[in-house]
């Protein structure tokens, strides 16, 4: 692997799968990974270089307590990305959008000048 290597997991799915299994990850630095894995919390994020991967793996192998703690935190964090959790967030976004739309409509209706009793705008 070189510094020009291509990161192919564009959504961080492999990292999430490891996290769901309670495993810390060593992952190449990318936007997808950064959105899921927090460096030194659930695993290690490194430059996409063999030496960086080797050093990160070695550090996890040498520090089993921290490795176990990262794995436990990884499993806990993975729940935030479950299908149910993601669906709840999407529903919340739609609910906020609907509420915003309804309040905007109500405000616009209140501002319309109408002739009394006719319902027609002046």
Image (cartoon, grey):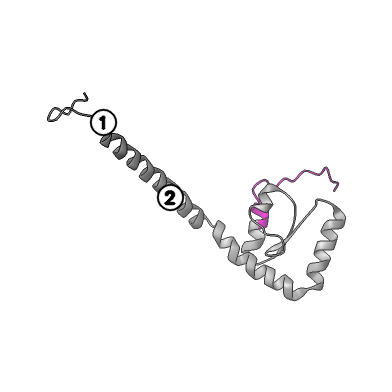
Residues at badges 1 and 2 in contact (C-beta under 8 Å)? no
Q: Which residue is mark 2?
A: 91
Q: Residue at 72% of width from left, 45% of height from top?
A: 8
* Magenta span dominant secondary structure: loop
Magenta part of the protein: which range?
A: 1-15
Q: Is residue 83 above or below residue 68?
A: above
What secondary structure is marked by label 2?
Answer: helix
Number of other residues with Cα within 10 Å of mark 2, as a class: few under 14, some 14 to 19, many 20 or more:
few
Q: Is residue 21 left or right of residue 114?
A: right
User: Which sits earlier in the primary sequence, circle 1 or circle 2?
Assistant: 2
Q: Residue furthest top?
A: 122
In the picture, residue 27 is in which quadrant? bottom right
Quadrant assignment for the C terminus: top left
Q: Is residue 54 left or right of residue 83?
A: right
Q: Residue at 59% of width from left, 61% of height from top?
A: 78
What secondary structure is marked by label 1?
Answer: loop
Q: Is residue 11 magenta?
A: yes
Identify which residue, 115 or 109, lies in the foreground.
Answer: 115
| Label of residue 112 in the image | 1
Q: Residue at 84% of width from left, 46% of height from top?
A: 3
Give coordinates of residue 69: x percent, y percent.
68, 72
Give coordinates of residue 62: x percent, y percent.
82, 72
């Amino acid at each position: 692997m070189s510094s020009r290597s291509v990161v192919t997991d564009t959504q961080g799915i492999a990292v999430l799968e490891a996290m769901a299994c309670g495993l810390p990850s060593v992952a190449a630095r990318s936007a997808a990974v950064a959105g899921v894995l927090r460096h030194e919390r659930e695993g290690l994020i490194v430059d996409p270089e063999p030496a960086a991967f080797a050093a990160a793996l070695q550090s996890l192998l040498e520090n089993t307590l921290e490795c176990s703690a990262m794995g436990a935190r990884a499993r806990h964090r993975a729940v935030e990305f479950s299908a149910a959790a993601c669906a709840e967030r999407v529903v919340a976004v739609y609910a906020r959008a609907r509420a915003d739309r309804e309040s905007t409509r109500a405000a616009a209706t209140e501002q319309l000048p109408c002739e009394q009793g006719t319902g027609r705008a002046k």
